[in-house]
Amino acid sequence: MAKNKAVRGAAVVNQRSIPWMLVAGVTVVAVFAAVIFGYAYSRWSDQAATREAQAAAEKATEAFKPSPQNPDPSKTIPGVVTADYKGQQHVKPDQRVAYDKNPPYGGPHDGVWADCTGVVYPQPVRTENMVHSLEHGAVWIAYNPDKVDEAALDRLKVRAEGKPYTMLSPYPGLDKPISLQSWGHQLKVDSADDPRIDQFITALRLNNNGVYPEVGGSCQAYPGAFDTNNPPKFDATPPGPDAIPMDGKGANAATGEMGQ
C-alpha cells in the first residue's frame, strides 16, 4: 500500500512539473508563425499569378508593336485620345503650367525631367516634371489612390517597376481609376486588368516613329537636379493667373537638355 502511494505521489509531482507557461508560449509563437507564413505565401502566390498574367499579356500585344508600316498602333486602341503639342518649351521650377488636360500628356513643362527608369513613386510628383519625361518617350501610368486597391496597384507595378522609360505614380483627383500618358496620347481605364493598358505601353513606349519630340532623350534622373527619392511635390491647387499657358508664351525655348 505504501508503495502504491509513493507511485501516485510521483505521478502528481511529475504532472505539476510540466512547464505550462513554456508550452503556451511555444503555441503562441507557432500560431503567429503560421499566420505570417500564410500571409507571405498568399502575397507570393498573388504576385506570381500577376507575373504570369503579365507575360501572357505581353504575348497578346505583339500586334501593337510599332513599325515603319504601322508607326502608331495606338490609333486602333479604343479609348485612346490624341493631341498635338509643341515640344521643348521649358518652365522654371517655381512656375506652373495651365494644363488643359488632367493628367496632362504634353505641352510646356519643367526643364528637368522626372526619373522614368521604371520608377514606382509612392507619392504624387510635380506634374511639370512628369510631362517632360513623356517628351523623352516615356509612358506615365497614373492612378487615383482612392479608386485603386492594393491588389490592382500590384498589377500596375508589374507594368512599371524596373521597366525602362516607364513610371508609375498616384494622381489625386483623377476622374478614372487609371490613366496612361505618352506624349500626345492618353488612355483612361477602370480596371488594372484592362488589356488596353499593355497595348498602350507596347504601342507608345519609346516609339521612335515621330510620336514624341526628343528621340534619344534620357530617362535617368539628371544628377543634382531631380532627386528620385525626394522628387518635387504634386500641387493639387489650380494654377494661378501667372501660370504658363498651353501655347507656351512665357516659357523658355530649349536648345538642348534642360533648356541649356
Image (tube, helix red, strand yellow):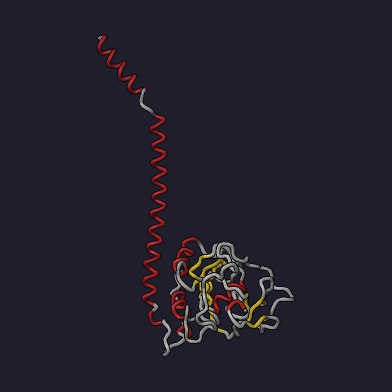
Q: Quadrant of residue 73?
A: bottom left
Q: Position of residue 67 (x, y in %)?
A: 42, 86
Q: Nearer the viewer, residue 201 or 15?
A: 201
Compared to residue 108, the image places residue 159 above or below, namely above
x%, y% of residue 107?
61, 81
Q: Quadrant of residue 131?
A: bottom right
Q: Nearer the viewer, residue 145 or 164?
A: 164
Q: Position of residue 88 (x, y in %)?
A: 60, 82
Quadrant including the N terminus: top left
Q: In this rendering, is residue 148 above or below 105?
A: above
In the displayed image of the protein, which residue is found farthest to the bottom?
Answer: 69
In this picture, residue 257 sits left or right of residue 164 = right
**Seen from this angle, which residue lies furthest top?**
2
Please report the residue visible at 42 percent of the width from the left and 48 percent of the height from the top: 36
Residue at x-position 66% and y-position 76% = 91
Q: Nearer the viewer, residue 225 or 101?
A: 225
The total of numbered circles placed on residues is: 0
Task: Identify the residue at horizontal 50%, vertical 67% (top origin).
Answer: 119
Instruction: For the C terminus, give its image quadrant.
Output: bottom right
Please tell me in which quadrant of the rendered image residue 244 appears. bottom right
Q: Position of residue 169 (x, y in %)?
A: 54, 67
Q: Is residue 81 visible?
A: no
The vertical placement of 103 against 15, above or below, is below
Residue 244 appears in the picture as rendered = yes
